[in-house]
Image (cartoon, helix red, strand yellow):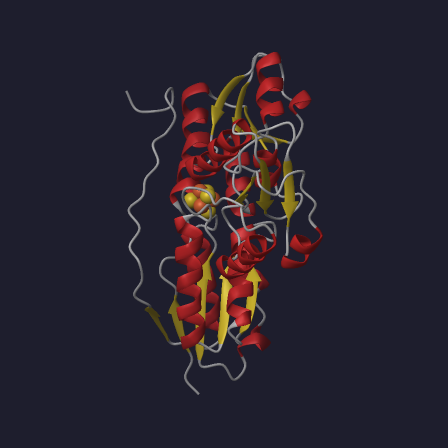
């Protein structure tokens, strides 16, 4: 039985991840090691280890950063309290928060200033959710599921709006928004969808991939929200779907009897890991690789002042 590999398009790095990694690398080149990074700059083990080898030091608590050192915020963003703490500690800060996350922060502050309560659709404990909810000191409510909407209590249903995490399932979020609008008919929407272009495009691509394949492999780390969503989206289309951090985690038995093997990667997973996965699946018997057509992405985010080429 022949076995072929089909690649999703687009897959892998988005503009926010490209920029966040470039910020750490550029800071290391300009200022030298160590450069402190609050939280994993992007949720990918390979990327984080590579930066660690170059002199990045990943910390969660700013108390672990020496006075006057250089600190970078991860792509997921930080609460205002962290910015205040960094200032008090005299740190030089470069902000790798994805501009599309910053856009949600701006939206939250605007709604809060308009005396509205804000519902955040997202996953409890995710750093992006903590960062976004930490833009204001009160008036934000987290919902994770449609069931949460049914029990949500807000001070004034006539002064209510919502935002969402950027890397959620597009379909699940639509269901939650529908439930919010049914329960709170006067709730206002953000000016523009918060789920980012990269999440949308990769989920669309994995749907097309799942329809053409009988197994889908997602390259991504366990803590990567958008990679997890890609695996779930594929599984919901009825194909076997697995997420692996690297090629060594692939199991030969998964591919027994499968003819079309789909491969994609989360927005924080580098292409070098995808190529290693392809090589391993070939070792399991696949003999050709093709790529599905897909949306072309041309978005590039500029580096912060101080790290740009002169
Ligand atoms: Fe930005 Fe979206 Fe990439 Fe997150 S997944 S870094 S929000 S572009």
Which percent across, then down, holds residue 141?
A: 65, 41
The N terminus appears in which quarter of the rendering?
Answer: bottom left
| Residue found 68% across the figure and 55% down from its top | 150
Q: Nearer the viewer, residue 263 or 201?
A: 201
Q: Nearer the viewer, residue 194 or 19?
A: 194
Image label count:
0
Corner quadrant of residue 34: top right
Which percent across, then down, holds residue 76?
A: 53, 38
Which percent across, then down, holds residue 4?
A: 39, 76
Corner quadrant of residue 153: top right
Q: Nearer the viewer, residue 63 or 79?
A: 79
| Residue found 60% across the figure and 49% down from its top | 223
Which percent across, then down, holds residue 125?
A: 67, 43
Q: Which residue in the rendered view is the most extreme toward the bottom? A: 1
Whether residue 286 is visible to the viewer of this picture, yes or no, is no
Q: Nearer the viewer, residue 175 or 187?
A: 187
The relative height of residue 287 versus residue 162 in the rendered view (above or below) is below
The relative height of residue 90 versus residue 50 in the rendered view (above or below) is above
The relative height of residue 126 versus residue 53 in the rendered view (above or below) is below
Whether residue 46 is visible to the viewer of this picture, yes or no, is yes
The C terminus appears in which quarter of the rendering?
Answer: top left
């Amino acid at each position: 039985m022949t076995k072929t590999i089909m690649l999703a398009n687009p897959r892998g790095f988005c503009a926010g991840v490209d920029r966040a990694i470039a910020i750490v690398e550029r800071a290391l080149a300009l200022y030298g090691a160590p450069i402190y990074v609050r939280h994993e700059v992007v949720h990918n083990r390979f990327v984080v280890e590579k930066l660690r080898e170059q002199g990045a030091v990943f910390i969660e608590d700013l108390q672990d950063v020496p006075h006057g050192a250089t600190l970078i915020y991860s792509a997921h963003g930080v609460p205002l309290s962290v910015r205040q703490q960094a200032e008090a500690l005299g740190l030089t800060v470069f902000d790798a928060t994805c501009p599309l996350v910053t856009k949600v922060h701006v939206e939250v502050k605007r709604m809060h200033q308009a005396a509205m309560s804000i519902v955040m659709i997202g996953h409890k404990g995710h750093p992006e959710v903590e960062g976004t909810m930490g833009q204001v000191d009160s008036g934000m409510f987290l919902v994770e599921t449609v069931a949460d909407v049914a029990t949500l209590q807000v001070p004034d249903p006539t002064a209510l709006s919502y935002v969402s995490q950027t890397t959620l399932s597009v379909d699940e979020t639509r269901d939650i928004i529908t439930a919010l609008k049914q329960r709170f008919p006067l709730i206002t929407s953000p000016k523009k969808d918060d789920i980012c272009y990269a999440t949308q495009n990769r989920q669309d691509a994995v749907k097309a991939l799942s329809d053409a394949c009988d197994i889908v492999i997602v390259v991504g780390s366990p803590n990567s929200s958008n990679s997890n969503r890609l695996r779930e989206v594929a599984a919901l289309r009825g194909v076997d779907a697995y997420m692996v951090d690297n090629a060594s985690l692939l199991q030969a038995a998964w591919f027994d009897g499968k003819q079309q093997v789909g491969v994609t990667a989360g927005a924080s997973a580098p292409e070098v890991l995808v190529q290693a996965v392809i090589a391993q699946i070939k070792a399991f018997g696949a003999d050709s690789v093709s790529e599905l057509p897909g949306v072309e992405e041309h978005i590039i985010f500029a580096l912060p002042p101080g790290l740009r080429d002169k």
